[in-house]
Structures are given as C-alpha cells and as structure tokens.
Image (tube, rainbow, N blue to C red):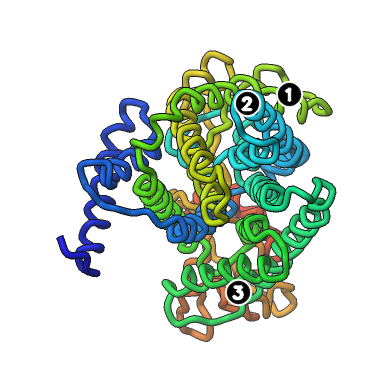
Amino acid sequence: MNITIENIILIGSVLLLISILAGKTTYRFGIPTLLLFLTIGMLAGSDGIGGIYFDNPQIAQFVGVVSLNFILFSGGLDTNWQSVKPVLKEGIALSTVGVLLTAVGLGYFVYLITDFELYESLLLGAIVSSTDAAAVFSILRGKNLALKKNLRPTLELESGSNDPMAYVLTIAFLTLVQFPEKNILSVLPMFFLQMVLGGTAGFLFGKLSKIIINRIRLDFEGLYPVLTIALMFITFSATDFIGGNGFLAIYICSVYLGNQNLIHKKTIMRMFDGLAWLMQIVLFLTLGLLVFPTQIVPFIGVGLLISLFLIFVARPLAVMISLLPFRMKLRRRFYISWVGLRGAVPIVFATYPLLAGIDKANSIFNIVFFVSLTSVLIQGSTLSLVAKWLGVGLPDSAKPLSATDELLSENPKAVMKEIIISESCPASGVKIVNLNFPKKAIIAMIQRDGNYITPNGLTKIEANDKLVVLTDKVEILDKVYDSLHLKRVKETNEESTK
C-alpha cells in the first residue's frame, strides 16, 4: 500500500472505529478499554497483523503532549472545588511526597535487581511514579464507581495533579544521567521554579481566560469551545516558555474555569469530554504502534518483578507515608494505593530518554511499557472488586450526583415563575453570566418593551424586564431571588407551581 494522506486517514479512522466498537463489547467483561486501545495499536503495528511500521518517538511524544493537554484540561473542568477542598491537603501530599517516594523506592529496587546505574534506575522510577490521569478518569467515570466519603475526589485530584511532579523528576534524573558530574542538589532550583511558575501561571491564565470567554462576543455558540482550546494551548506553551510546568498550569487553569460561570459552559464541557475520549484513543493507539512486542519479550521477567514491586510495595508504602499526617481509615488508604494506575503518561515520559539518546533508553521504554500494560490489566480490571472487598464502595442507587453531573443533566423544568426587575434592583445592568444564577434554573425568556428576547450569558438585565424563569423545584426559586438580590414574596402553592 502506498503511503498517502488518504491512506493515513483511512487507516486511522478504521482503527478508531474498531477501538470504539471493541471497547463497547469488552467493557461488559470488565476489561479496561484503554488496554484494548493499546492492544489494537500493537496488533496494527509492524510486529502485528497490520504491518504498519511506526518508529518515531518524536511524533509519539508530540501526540502524547497534545493529548495530555486535552485529558488534563477536561479532567480539571470536571473537578468541583467544593468536593476537592476538603481533601486538598491529602491530594497535594499524594501528588508530591507520594510521587517522590514512589520514584525513589522503585528506583532503588531497580538498581538492586538490574545492571542499571543509580541515576538510570531513579529515572525509570520517576517515569512510572505518577498515577495516570487518562486511566483514572476514564476507568472511574466509565465504570461509574460510587465510592464512600471523599475517596473519588481524592483519587481524581491526585491523578490530575501528580503528572507535573513526575515530569519534573523525569527531566531532573534525565539531566543527571546525561551529566553525571552534577548532583541532585543542582536540579532542585529547576524543580521549585517549574512548580511555582506553573502554579502561578495556571491561576493567572485561568482568570484571564474567564475574562476573555465571558467578554468576547462570538457569533456562533460552537466557537466558544474552539476559543477555550486556543486558551488551553496558550496556557501550556506560554508557561513552558517562561520555565514553568505547563501540565500543572493547564490543570490549575481548567479547575479554576470549571468552577466559574462561563458563557455556554455546558457546550464547552461536553465538547472537551468528547475530545478527551478521542485523545485517549489516539494516544493509546499511537503508543501501541510505537512499541515492538518482540522487543518486550526479553524484559518480561524483570518487567513483571518491577511491576509487582510497584503495585504491592512501592505505591502502598508511598501512600501510607504521605498520608500519615491525616486521619483516614486504613481500608481507604489501601484503596487509594490500589488505584495507582499507570497508563499512557509513563509511556509518553519514556520517550524523553529515547530522544535524549542515552544508553539504556530502549530498555527503559520497553520496561515502562510492560509496567503500564500490567498495571492497567491488574489494577484497572479489579477496581470495582477491590472496592467491594474493602467496603469503600456504594450501591449505584446511593451514588450522589456530582456538581458536573447536575450541570449537564437535562431535568424537566416544571416550575415557571415571572419576575419583574425594578429600577432599584441591584441586578439591573448586570450580565446574566455574572449573576451567580442557580445551575438548576434558567432564564428562558425576557419580556422587554413589548418584545420577547431569548437571552444568553452575555445578555444584560435591565430595569422593568420581566424574566420568565424555569426550574425543576420550587425551592430553587429562593436561590433565584438571592442571585437577583430580591426578596421573594410568599406565594400559594397554586401560584408557585403554575
């Protein structure tokens, strides 16, 4: 077959279609879909039945970085601050101290059982030290797991925020492998600079992005997700340009935006949810194509030892130590340690040694790939079962709706109320997006000067406007009046439900 643009599109679309259809089937048997995407990529590769030769770590790294932007941004948009706030300290401890302890503990084990030098071993440990956001988000949400207390926000916060730490450690130890005359203390300034600049830039770009999204008036609703994508990439690349951690920046930026009132927020969130799934499939297919299964075979023995040590020793110890200052039941700590999924992110990070051209680069890549494969297979397929064993799961009927689920839910609005805005009303002259209007209520129509207006977030409320408000519960009307800075007049049941 001649390699043409048309053939590349054909092969890519066929692989995408097969992945989606096969994922729907295998999900019923408890097989993680991400593992399936990797397998399809491997089968389509040069060692598989597809015979597609792909051996370009640079392109794979580019695809990985772009995909991680979408995956982290989508995960951040879905993160509710009120849910995360109670577990913020635990999440930060896991994503910093936990990652560092995992990297060092696993790295030293690799040093003991292989012929790797110490810095090479620590580099491998750093690459697989973080839980994978793509794997955790997709499996937790795909399986719709209902977990007790604040377990799920803790797990999603850790997986979304620990990639930056693993990235910095990977770059730091890669530098030490390339320049062994340096010591660990010499890379500390880079570490702190990356984290501080990344966190600060993410927050500032989040505030700037909110202003741009809410103030710019676009003619088409579909352009708002496109605008958000542009702002996402600007946040990542600008932060990286000034020496900060771009992955941390886009996660913080998206968490900030996800908890603000935005124009066409539902459209933006739905678009990013679909794009995140697309990027997960593309990322895993690409990484599956990049690997040569025949080259992994010699590393199965050592890879299995490293993987089992990571799952049953390094990760649990890191979780237990990093959570020592906090009050938490032991069974919940064990479950957090079990949800230490390694997926695409370690494989993407493993391309950095390949591009750097260090001696053990191919060995590191193949071992990391095997570790990620076994992690998704062993841990990803047993999350529901382990949750049941440890007693940390909830029945589906008892699962509370998250703030994101409530926002995107399409509940029938059976309660209607007309509210007249007086000249002295503080809401007069304010845009709807700035009203802090309840998410379970909508302003369906505005009667103004004898005309009816269909409003959007940029519409300004004016004096003498008659607002037609729809909601699903009478109780929500109290919040509606509060957002308009009006006192609600007591009504009869007949009036309030007409």
- Relative to 34, does residue 381 appear above or below in the rendering? above
Which quadrant holds the N terminus? bottom left
- Please tell me in which quadrant of the rendered image residue 199 appears: bottom right
Residue designated by label 2: 337
| Residue located at (23% from left, 56% from top) | 11
- Residue furthest toward the left? 1
Work out whether residue 196 can be spotted.
yes
* Of the pair 229 and 183, the residue shown nearer to us: 183
Q: Is residue 146 left or right of residue 429?
A: left
Front label number (3 vs 2):
2
C-alpha separation, residue under disc 2 versus residue under disc 1: 8 Å
Contact, CB < 8 Å: mark 2 with mark 1? yes
Q: Amino acid at mark 3?
A: Asn
Question: Residue 412 at x, y = what percent?
Answer: 42, 50
Q: Which residue is mark 1?
A: 320
* Front tag of 3 and 1: 1
Query: Residue 247 location in percent, x, y?
Result: 62, 56
The amino acid at mark 2 is Ser
Q: Is residue 456 above or below residue 43?
A: below
Choose the circle earlier in sequence order: 3 or 2: 3
The residue located at (34%, 36%) in the rendering is 294
| Disc 3 to disc 2: CB gap under 8 Å | no
Q: Which residue is mark 3?
A: 214
Nearer-N-terminus badge (3/1): 3
- The image position of residue 450, as x and y in percent, is 48, 84
Q: Across the whole image, how many numbered discs are drawn on residues? A: 3
